[in-house]
Image (cartoon, rainbow, N blue to C red):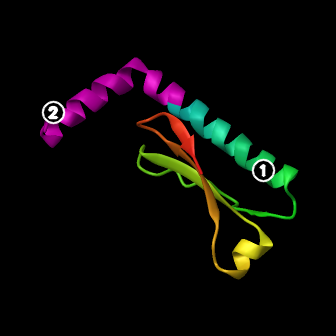
Amino acid sequence: METLHKSMLEYQSQLKKGVIQQAYRGLMEFMGVLRARFASAYPDYFVSSSLYFGYMDITFFSVKSTALKAHNLKVAVVFLHEGCRFEV
């Protein structure tokens, strides 16, 4: 395992390239649009008003139906950064 110092040097190096920021910004915009479309397409559901951005590991928003809400449950639409995939 790398030391924090070495990891930070690599992080800085990668940020200087600009690709990480571009990809992350695009992903956050996509997730925001997806959340808004869920809210618009399913007005009877409770869609969280914001995204959870995580620590570059997961990003998600939650969706609850009336039945789920009655049981204090919810469904999360999750993007897993490392695997670059969605899960529910």
Residue range in magenta is: 1-23
Q: Is residue 75 above or below residue 16?
A: below
Tell whether 15 sits left or right of 71: left
Q: Is residue 35 left or right of residue 27?
A: right
Q: Position of residue 87 (x, y in %)?
A: 56, 46
Q: Position of residue 41 (x, y in %)?
A: 86, 50
Q: Is residue 17 magenta?
A: yes
User: Does the segment drawn in magenta span residue 85?
Assistant: no
The residue carrying pointer 1 sits among few (fewer than 14), some (14 to 19) or many (20 or more) residues within 10 Å by Cα, namely: some
Instruction: Give the number of marks.
Output: 2
Residue 20 placed where, x, y %? Answer: 44, 27
**Image quarter in which the N terminus is found:** top left
Q: Identify whether 4 is placed above or below 88.
A: above
Secondary element at tag 1:
helix
Circle 2 is placed at which residue position? 6
Given residues 15 and 71, the one toward you in this image is 71
**Position above or below: 41 against 64:** above
Question: Residue at label 1?
Answer: 38
* Amino acid bearing label 1: Phe
